[in-house]
Amino acid sequence: MIRSAVSGAVLAMVACAVPVRAQQAAGQDTARLAGFTEQTTLGGSADLPARLVADDEVKQTLISPILLGPWFEFKGRMNESLGFKFGINYNTLFMGASSSLTGNDNASGGVLEINGDWTLLGRGGPNTGVLGFRLESRHKYTDLAPNQLGAEIGSLWKPDVLWGTFDFAVSQLWWEQRFMSGKGAVRFGKLITPAVIYDNFFLRVPQLTFENETMVFSATAFPSNGLGAVAVIFPTDNLYVQGGIHDANGSPTEAGFDTFFDIREYFVAGEIGWVSSFERRRQDNYHLTVWHTDERSEKGTPSGWGLTIALQRYFNDRIMPFLRYSYSDGGATPMNHLMTGGIGYRVKGHNGFGVGLSWASPSDAALRDQFGIESMYRLYLAQTVSVIPGLQFLINPSLNPDEDVIAVLSLRVRLSI
């Protein structure tokens, strides 16, 4: 028992530790743990390279420096000598609903992510070539995985979309080549879900910010991870155009050559947007996204198309109001009209809260409209540990006509080293 207690205390110290030394990255105002700076042009704030850089920022925390300085120094040396950045994350989620259709009203699970990007070409310059990868496992602790809870409570959308189940797999493996002095890029290979690439939304990080389906996927028939290619060009610092093609039958656990080249059912998207500057392309963003998905014969999903108009601005790096409208035609998604809006507010350091509102009109005209409210607060206990309690209210759940309001309480804990 004593040995177990000592071991638990040591593990807690390691998990909650901050490094002894924080590096100031060259040309950056933000202090860094390992000196990571961004090398990729594509993707939103939840994209793998962007998360590596964001996780590396020094944060104001409740726990003073203890350990892990040598670990981040090692990561810094790997980046400086080889151009190799990596990180390991473990994310947990516990959810409970006030009622359900079946009696199953709680769900919990974990997600293990091992992320890396390796700058193999042009290191030190703007036109880099980067190899990116993610090794990942998603598992449940209870009978239900969190992304299954929505169906149990009769919600039109899922209260969570990330925490599912699949065995340890290479869920991403791609190459990104930058050109035009970094203002253009093409990425191809096994890509993350296009939801992270198009329709940029700065608060779309289900591990740390909003997590319900309306905030993460909007009313778009985004497929899962799979083979694809996407390109973006910034002809000016304020204007960008991007587009790509993706496997509509993609899977994070399959290579996908058979579905991409033999079945040939695709999701395609194009986007045009305005940003306040290239450097703030993820924070201050106004865009129009248009998409089309082929019929998925084996899944029985019809073809469809849609669009999203989105507005977001990060004022004084503290407050971010946002507003988005999505339309989907053809029944490829459970909703054909979706409006979301809200606000994110940075309280102190990297701690902050957000409130988001959602309204959706179902694709099935026989169902009633559903409304939703999601609130969350993110607190960094230490450089490597964040805690995010959340509360959602699902009003007039479309698939549960006997209930007027269902509350969903959640707690997320994230370890990132």
Image (tube, helix red, strand yellow):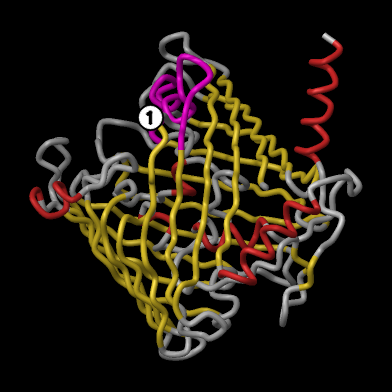
Classify residue 209 as left or right of residue 62.
left
Judge whether 247 appears above or below 77 on screen: above
Q: Nearer the viewer, residue 266 or 376?
A: 266
- Tag 1 residue: 398
Residue type (three-letter) at the residue carrying disc 1:
Ser
Classify residue 56 as left or right of residue 215.
right
Q: Nearer the viewer, residue 327 or 380?
A: 380
Percent across and percent down for residue 288 are: 38, 70
Q: Quadrant of the N terminus?
A: top right
SS state under label 1: loop
Percent across and percent down for residue 159 are: 49, 34
Q: Residue at x 72, y 82 (%)?
A: 27
All told, the count of numbered labels is 1
Percent across and percent down for residue 91 are: 59, 37
Judge whether 179 appears above or below 157 on screen: below
Q: Residue at x 35, y 66 (%)?
A: 289
Place residue 121 in its image quadrant: bottom left
Q: Residue at x 64, y 47 (%)?
A: 355
Residue 150 forms part of the magenta stretch? yes
Place residue 151 in its image quadrant: top left
Percent across and percent down for residue 43 are: 45, 65
Q: Nearer the viewer, residue 160 or 59?
A: 59
Residue range of the region highlighted in magenta in the rendering: 137-157
